[in-house]
Image (cartoon, grey):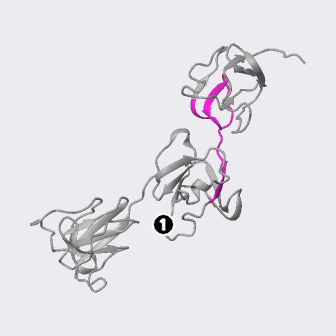
Amino acid sequence: MFCSPIIAQNGEVVIYTGTNFTGANMALRGNWSGGSISGLIFERRIKSVRIPAGYRVTMFAEKNYRGASTGVLTEDWNPGPGAYWINRVRSIRVDRAEIQPPITPGDFPVIYAQANYSGPAEAIENGFAGRSDWEGSPHRIRSIRVPAGWKLTLYTERNYRGTETSISSSISWEPGAYWNGRVRSIHAERTNVPPPVPGDPVIYAQINFNGPAMAIVRDWPELRDWDGSPHHVRSIRVPQGRPIMVYEKKNYRGKSYLVTSDWTPQPGDWWYGRIRSIKVNPGPQPR
């Protein structure tokens, strides 16, 4: 009896009775201690194995994971005719390798459309009220990277409603898990915003004092490299007694705003990303 070839997907290891992933085949959703599978005999008949990313496979010469072993395999196994392990495998252990989420610029939480932090992604800088393009048209949230110092509250409905749960570390849901694809909105809370430090004012390219930074030690009539090419000013550290005046245009023109303490405008604030020049210690201001 032969089955049409299938490809490893959704975390399934696939064993084949032919080389080059041909012949009778079966998907393993866990360990195989030996014996027939769905009426098919695979003991001492396995010649190739598909191993998806994030999984580890060890094959044994005896049932119940005993006898000689291949060692840990993390990629597709297809040794070709004449190889030692051809037709010798009688049991297989399948382990899930821990996949670390990638580090991203700004160190913000990131939602992913696929498990294991893969596929289309979007950083969550200031919460996520929900959008149709992350509700299955075309994506769903299936894994989330949570950097250290962040707490996320997940909701099953838009605008922070419905069933909720909280996470403070990265998570990748298995198929069938309750929260896999159900997240519709996310409240993001930073729990470790660093305290103010003495010294000069410092501008940051991201909110909450993250990303590329530069100390402001003198007046800056034109903030080159900070007008969107490549950065915008999105938060500022202002030590006590060191106020600064920010301006919407270069050469201290346009709207101005006196900043006397740490400041992190949020998306939607008029000043978010608009600062083009800065004066330090601007002195008394007119009433």
Q: Quadrant of residue 108?
A: top right
Seen in the image, is 63 located left or right of residue 112?
left
33 is higher (above) or lower (below) than 193 = below
Mark 1: secondary structure: loop
Magenta-drawn stretch contains 170? no
- Image quarter (top left, top right, bottom left or bottom right) of the C terminus: top right
When the figure is inspected, residue 208 is found, relative to residue 109, above or below; the finding is above
Q: Amino acid at mark 1?
A: Glu
Residue 95, horizontal then vertical, whole percent: 36, 67
**Residue nearest the observer in this picture, 287 or 156:** 156
Q: Is residue 201 visible?
A: yes
Q: Is residue 283 left or right of residue 97?
A: right
Indicate whether 97 appears above or below 224. Answer: below
For the point 56% across and 22% down, which residue is it? 225
Which region shows up in magenta? 184-212
What residue lies at 87% left-to-right and 16% top-to-bottom?
286
**Occupied quadrant, residue 68:** bottom left
Q: Position of residue 208 (x, y in %)?
A: 65, 38
Q: Residue furthest left?
A: 82
Of residues 195 and 258, the one nearer the viewer is 258
Give the quadrant of residue 243.
top right
The residue at which mark 1 appears reads as 174
Residue 16 image position (x, y, % from top left): 23, 72
Give the side of residue 57 with respect to residue 123, left or right.
left
Residue 205 position, x and y percent, is 60, 31
Up-down relation of residue 268 to residue 73 (above or below) = above
Query: Which quadrant would the N terminus be assigned to in this image?
Result: bottom left
Q: Residues within 10 Å of mark 1 (few under 14, many from 20)?
A: some
Q: Residue at x 61, y 29 (%)?
A: 232
